[in-house]
Image (cartoon, rainbow, N blue to C red):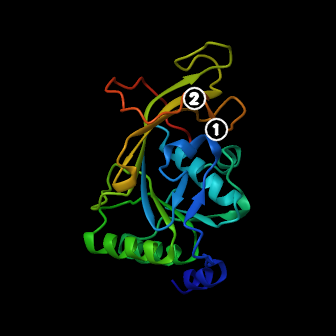
Amino acid sequence: MQDLHLLGDRFRPLTLAGERILPVISPLVSLLPEGGLRRGSVIAVGGSGATSLALALLAGVSQSGSWTVAVGVPALGLAAAAELGVDLERLVLVDIPPPAQWAAVVAALADAFDAVLVRPTHRVRPGDARRLVARVRERGGVLCQLPAPSATWPDVPDLTLTVASAAWRGVAPGETGGAGRLRSRRVTVEATGRRGAAQPRRVDLWLPGSDGCVTLANPAVTSRREPSSSSAPAAMEEAG
């Protein structure tokens, strides 16, 4: 823990009063009520492809010069993160903390980094969750939660981004369903939340595109329409 506090002293963000929003890459702007990540907010990312979507969120933050950290995501692929736009020189990876120290470790990192990506390994106690969220709001950072089968988070996030549907494409034009060498994935991402984020939003993305980058699938059709009730097609989660 002493090492984490030293890390916090080294990388602690200096936030000006007017810097209320952390930037995101342009394909994600229309998903967010204020066109970026509000400092002091908690965001949950879910669905097949959640890790890639979370990395895409971190991309704009790191490109703007802010520090980011991923806690307890040991399979995170650095090559994939770089292709999605994450500045690896602004990304720190922290191993899975022991359950008894998890909340303290994440809180210490929230002191040091503008954006903290976490995948809990256990049920987070309500008291720990409240203190952690309070720390994030006080420091003006962003806490991004990845889903975990054996873990639960007691509080409702400010914003939830869900990969509602996804379909991979193979090496040849028009190939779908995993034919050939997988090279691109088209996803529909839906955003719901509280207060200013209460109105549902949706965007279709290539996550990733054939070049590994994130781009809009329908550049002229980004909307705030109601989420579709249709079932999502089969999809493959990214490695890492």
Image depth: mark 2 or mark 1 in front: 1
Residue 101 visible in image: yes
State the SS at label 2: strand
Q: Is residue 21 above or below residue 47?
A: below
Q: Is residue 104 above or below residue 199?
A: below
Q: Which of the 4 quarters of the picture holds residue 184?
A: top right
Residue occupying the point 55% across, 25% down: 168
Q: Nearer the viewer, residue 45 or 94?
A: 45
The residue where tag 1 is placed is: 214
- Numbered circles on residues, count: 2
Near mark 2 (Cα within 10 A), the count class, few <14, some 14-19 or many ≥20, is many
Residue occupying the point 68% across, 38% down: 213
What amino acid is found at the position of numbered circle 1 in the picture?
Val
What amino acid is found at the position of numbered circle 2 in the picture?
Arg
Expressed as whole percent of the image width and height from the top left, the position of residue 229 reads: 31, 26
Q: Is residue 65 left or right of residue 184?
A: right
Residue occupying the point 59% across, 27% down: 220
Mark pair 2, 1: CA separation: 10 Å
The residue where tag 2 is placed is: 185
Q: Nearer the viewer, residue 83 or 98?
A: 83
Q: Which of the 4 quarters of the picture holds residue 170?
A: top right
State the SS at label 1: loop
Expressed as whole percent of the image width and height from the top left, the position of residue 8 reads: 59, 81
Q: Is residue 52 left or right of residue 80?
A: left
Q: Disc number at residue 52?
A: none
Q: Is residue 185 above or below residue 80?
A: above
Whichever of labels 2 and 1 marks the residue nearer the N terminus, that label is: 2
Expressed as whole percent of the image width and height from the top left, the position of residue 24 reads: 61, 52
